[in-house]
Amino acid sequence: MSPDESREILASIERWVEREVRPIARRYDHADEYPHELVGQMQALGLFGATIAEEYGGLGLSASVYAQIVTAISAAWMAPVGIFNSHLVMAACVQRHGTPAQRERWLPRFASGEVRGGIGLTEPDAGTDLQAIRTVARRDGAHYVIDGTKTWITNGVYGSCFAVLVKTDPGAEPRHKGMSLLLCEKGPGFTIGRKLKKLGYKSIDSAELVFEGLRVPADQLIGEVEGSGFQQAIAGLELGRINVAARGAGIALGALRESLRYAQQRRTFGKPIAQHQAIQLKLADMATRVEAAKLLIDQAAAKYDAGERCDLEAGMAKLFASEAGVENSLEAMRIFGGYSYSTEFDIERYYRDAPLMCIGEGTNEMQRIIIARQLLERNPL
Ligand SMILES: Cc1cc2nc3c(=O)[nH]c(=O)nc-3n(C[C@H](O)[C@H](O)[C@H](O)COP(=O)(O)OP(=O)(O)OC[C@H]3O[C@@H](n4cnc5c(N)ncnc54)[C@H](O)[C@@H]3O)c2cc1C
């Protein structure tokens, strides 16, 4: 895709955000209601195939352009990004690790949004320590039979297909050698436990997935080789982290924009609060964080697009940009004073949405550990 085409796509997304997303954000967020009307619009914009290759009907966007799209939407309302983002992480697993037959079969349906879903890794007793999962897939002739529970799964209620991390050999040592990723479609044996109630990231369905004897055809094992699921899931996290970083940067940018506007309207002691130096210091720090986050994201995405290992860069981008989202939304709360606490302004939503970015796709504590390990590996004595 040429730079002109990328710019045009980004511009059309920005127009859509202003026309359709921003005006409904507050109402849907407060009602914790799923924004069904946005799904068809996202389909028309091609978002369900944003990073899927053009030969399978996707837009084939680079991680760099995709990250800019995610930032643009999140600057108005972060939550709807979850509808296509986890879906694309599932699609990336098939695109990168699936057999040619799996790519032919699944990617066109993912790209059109006909089949939508996400990624099921986390369990009630295993999040960061993914190798401790208990969901088991037992081979039975031409099928796998799945039993277990996943939790916090984005798109759990309204999605129909998930890349689910399972143990195909629960006794394997090291543990990751007994893990596989299976594409599981809803049907008998696959039910939704409950929709989870949350502080923020409202409207989007985060749910428990319950597997009780679900029979999955063996050709839905991604790559059709047992024991690679952990690596496949971890490889997907590089892109996932760039995306979470882009969401954090979006929140940081949204909080800055709202603050810039409000600080020039609100007056105290005879002048706009933007004329008080204490407020100017905040605005300067907020803007600097946004630009630094964008640069880190660009750097990680460029490496990803070049096919290079980028866990250090994606980790730095995720860590910095998500913390920028938290810091900027808190600073915006201070700038808005009492009105920040009002549900008639958007600042309280940015403030509630931001911390999730510090948790998802690997907590920020883990990002620091990944960054430090890479630093030590790249700089031996
Ligand atoms: C709204 C929402 C949506 C989500 N969507 C999905 C989804 O679509 N799919 C999915 O699979 N999961 C999803 N998750 C789950 C998310 O990925 C996990 O919550 C996250 O990985 C952390 O796992 P945990 O909650 O089990 O925390 P834990 O692993 O229990 O960690 C608790 C604390 O201990 C720290 N910690 C753990 N191990 C170490 C260590 N070795 N060294 C230092 N510190 C450590 C962590 O950093 C954290 O501070 C979602 C979560 C939320 C809240």
Image (cartoon, rainbow, N blue to C red):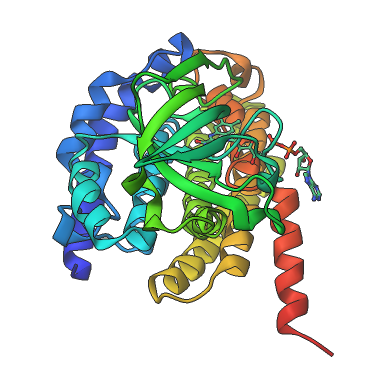
Q: Quadrant of residue 274?
A: top right
Q: Residue furthest right?
A: 381
Q: Which of 206 and 274 is in front in this view?
A: 206
- Asked whether residue 363 appears in the rendered view, the answer is no
Looking at the picture, does residue 62 appear above or below residue 21?
below
Q: Residue furthest bottom?
A: 381
Taking the spot 55% from the left edge, 40% from the top edge, the residue there is 121
Looking at the picture, does residue 3 appear above or below residue 151?
below
Measured as percent of width and height from the top left, residue 313 is found at 58, 68
Measured as percent of width and height from the top left, residue 170 is found at 65, 44
Measured as percent of width and height from the top left, residue 359 is found at 65, 40
Q: Quadrant of the N terminus?
A: bottom left
Q: In which quarter of the image is the C terminus?
A: bottom right
Measured as percent of width and height from the top left, residue 102 is found at 26, 53
Q: Nearer the viewer, residue 50 or 222?
A: 222
Q: Nearer the viewer, residue 358 or 325?
A: 358
Q: In which quarter of the image is residue 116?
A: top left
Q: Which of 313 and 206 is in front in this view?
A: 206
| Picture mark count | 0
Image quarter where ligand 1 lies: top right
Taking the spot 19% from the left edge, 34% from the top edge, the residue there is 114
Looking at the picture, does residue 244 appear above or below residue 64?
above
Taking the spot 43% from the left edge, 27% from the top edge, the residue there is 214
Taking the spot 55% from the left edge, 56% from the top edge, the residue there is 234
- Asked whether residue 149 appears in the rendered view, the answer is yes
Q: Residue furthest front?
A: 141
Looking at the picture, does residue 371 appear above or below residue 158?
below
